[in-house]
Amino acid sequence: MRQKTFGKWLAAAGILIVMTIWLALPALAAQTVNSVRITFTDKYTDPGVISEPDITCSTFGIEITSVEWSKDVEKWNPGTKVTATLILSSSGREFSSSYGSKSCQISGATLSKAVKVDDDLKVTVTYYPVVWLEAPEEAGWSASNHMKAVWKKVDYATGYQIRLYRDDYYRRTIDATGTSKDLSEYMGREGNYYYEIRAVGKTTNDAKYRKSSEYIVSSDRYLDDLGDTEGSWKNYADGKKYVDENGQIVTSQWYRILGTWYYFDENGYMATGWRLVNNKWYYLESDGKMVTGWKQVGGVWYYMDTDGAMATGWRQTAPGQWYYLNANGAMAASTVIDGCTLDASGLWVS
């Protein structure tokens, strides 16, 4: 009887030992951190401000103890990579000597390497900053070209999107770069025009790192003297001619087309460059449009009055800004005229 009891006890003890070892195996395996998951979340705070992303680790028992960037955030640019070095610590478990992209999963950035340093894990990643663009300021119209939209440059923007309206009816959307856009080809009828504009990323890649700004509304521009809006241009070997709304080729005159003045010679060809008309000099662009305001030709600055005629003598081009134009139209600079000192930019320094 004792032998049977002892045998049963021995069998039970064996089973207990096996179970104890079996239950201990997961605990032993859990001492090593098999994988890590880190998430970079882009932050869009105030328009025009680039911010560090939120960085979190969703692996249980793992803590991000420090983050060091390769550049100060003030020097970041949208879409230009920066490097982040993270130090991770673990409570009660050990890191492997290194991790690849499958075992160290990074969301919102790209893993460069993850290696064990002492008891911690050093993770290096590449991140591309993002920004919410500011809206353009002072959206309006050029004083010298009533159909040219103008606005202030927006930091980090690589393009702009314009929505044009006439008499409160939407006309079309136009893409632009720079800080101005000639809209004359879309303003062929009389009416009250205005536009909405926002800053954007010009290309698909730019847009990945640049959140478009809000639209702002420009000032109004009422057009009631556009001239000929029904004629057509004709191209010839020696230049361009214009056939008016009555089917006649325009010759030997100034002619207003869609709000812009052009000059056509006796043969009907559109004039370009310098042109002497009725003893006054005018300058016409390569597309034939008459110039008003400042124009640099051959490295020399000239000023064209509102009627397009080349200015000579004193001119106030803006409140409090006086310049002197010589008899040949060239702006004077770094000299004294009539007792007035002109600086290197030609401005009268009082």
Image (cartoon, helix red, strand yellow):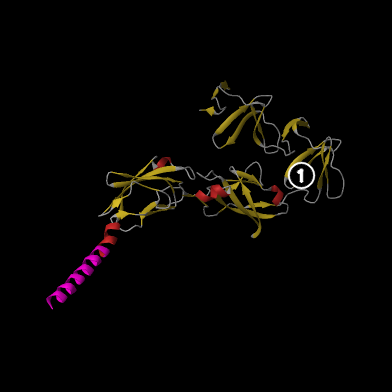
Looking at the image, residue 135 sits to the left or right of residue 280; the answer is left
Can I make out residue 335 in this image? yes
Q: Which SS class for mark 1?
A: strand
Quadrant location of residue 274? Answer: top right
- Residue at position x 69%, y 55% in the image: 191
Quarter-wise, where is residue 237 in the image? top right
Q: Identify residue for label 1.
A: 256
Above or below, 328 against 250 in this view is above
- Image quarter in which the N terminus is found: bottom left
Left or right: where 79 falls relative to 104: right
Query: Residue 293 at what x, y percent from top left?
Result: 64, 36
Residue 72, picture quadrant: top left
Residue drawn at x 30%, y 54% is 32
**For the view shown, which residue lies furthest in the bottom direction?**
1
User: Start and end of the magenta stretch?
Assistant: 1-22
Give the residue drawn at x 78%, y 38%.
263
Q: Residues within 10 Å of mark 1 (few under 14, many from 20)?
A: some
Q: Where is residue 18 in the image (x, y as percent from the top left)?
A: 24, 65
- Give yes or no for residue 14 being in the magenta stretch: yes
55 versus 340 height, above or below: below
The answer to if 18 sits in the magenta stretch is yes
Q: Quick one: 230 or 286, which is closer to the camera?
A: 286
Left or right of residue 18: residue 228: right
Q: Which amino acid does label 1 sit on?
A: Arg
Q: Main secondary structure of the magenta part?
A: helix
Q: Where is residue 132 in the image (x, y as percent from the top left)?
A: 48, 51
